[in-house]
Image (cartoon, helix red, strand yellow):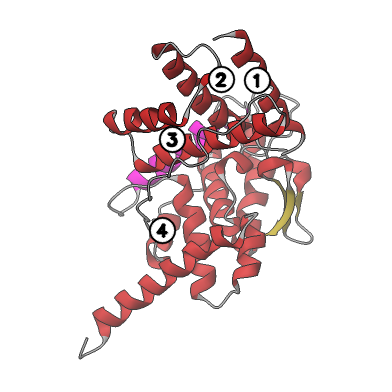
Amino acid sequence: MLKDVNDSLKLFIEYLQIEKNCSKYTIEHYHHDICGFIMFMSEQSIASISEVQYSDARLYLTNLFERKLARKTIARRISSLRSFYKFLLREELIQDNPFALVSIPKIEKRLPEFFYEEELEQLFKSCETVTPIGQRNKALLELLYATGIRVSECCQIRIKDLDFSLSTILVHGKGSKDRYVPFGKQANVALKQYIQNGRLELLTNKQSHDVLFVNYRGGPLTERGVRTVLNSMFEKSTLNGKIHPHMLRHSFATHLLNNGADMRSVQELLGHAFLSSTQVYTHVSNEYLRKTYMNHHPRA
């Protein structure tokens, strides 16, 4: 990487961290996307970021399509570069934004995958709570579905974040935004059993950390570990198909809306910055109603 590129990228990352208060995950995406373009610049013998023209931006877009990347990935990369150059323009490090007029490809809208309430009941029934691992798994499943929190948020939860008297949890969300989310009776019971019994047994090395969910060695459970746990539970159930942690988040939001919750409340519970992010679940609910109608109405 050339020096002016290095310096510009460093400034932009600091801007994302300090001014925009972006999450670590978001910053990693920006960094990855911009570094990908810097490699393209090197291949095209473009010596400086200020030398990039609209034609170069178009050529890069064509290059992404030729590599058969998903439209969503291409759209994100172009959006990242547009933001990067917009920042450089604001700082007067360049004179124009070559990505300003590059059209982002339309993304095929997919409805979020979710479980029906009957399917989740089968999953919960397959949970054993005799062993420490079983108690942890049941508490993990109950909490993810009861709160709709992200896996990254779940792995950050500490014992002190739980308030059993109010049945609420302090969630440390994206962009360092905290929120309180309630959880129900089933999650309350499962969490208490796990904390008072299973978790203590798993902390074999008498580790002093207060991270809520731990692995079989007593260390903090990672995001990858959560996925492994859920896959194992799913395989032991009678359900077919696949599971990923976000399906529980999608199920949480969809079931709330199906049962009459208002969208603003669901937005707050999910920790969405924009209502548009939550509106996708109305489409899921409408599709659910449509299928119910088609399957059950005598003249459908």
Say few, some or many: other residues with alpha carbon within 10 Å of mark 4 (under 14 / 14 to 19 / 20 or more). many
Image location of residue 187, percent across then percent down: 61, 57
Q: Secondary structure at mark 4?
A: loop
Could you tell whether 55 is left or right of 204 in the image? left
Say few, some or many: other residues with alpha carbon within 10 Å of mark 2 (under 14 / 14 to 19 / 20 or more). some
Could you tell whether 268 is left or right of 151 in the image? right
N-term-proximal mark, 1 vs 2: 1
Q: Nearer the viewer, residue 298 or 239?
A: 298
Q: Nearer the viewer, residue 77 or 216?
A: 77
- Disc 4 designates what residue? 114
Label 3 to label 4: alpha-carbon separation = 18 Å
Say few, some or many: other residues with alpha carbon within 10 Å of mark 3 (under 14 / 14 to 19 / 20 or more). some
- Disc 2 designates what residue? 49
Image location of residue 173, percent across then percent down: 67, 45
Q: Are marks 3 and 4 in contact (CB under 8 Å)?
A: no
Mark nearest the camera among 3 and 1 is 1
Q: Residue at x 61, y 65 (%)?
A: 266
Q: Residue furthest left?
A: 299
Label 4 to label 2: alpha-carbon separation = 43 Å
Residues in magenta?
220-236
The amino acid beneath tag 1 is: Ser
Q: Residue at x 59, y 70 (%)?
A: 263
Label 4 to label 1: alpha-carbon separation = 42 Å
Q: Nearer the viewer, residue 173 or 154?
A: 173
The amino acid beneath tag 2 is: Ile
Numbered circle sitting on residue 228:
3
Image location of residue 233, percent across then percent down: 41, 45
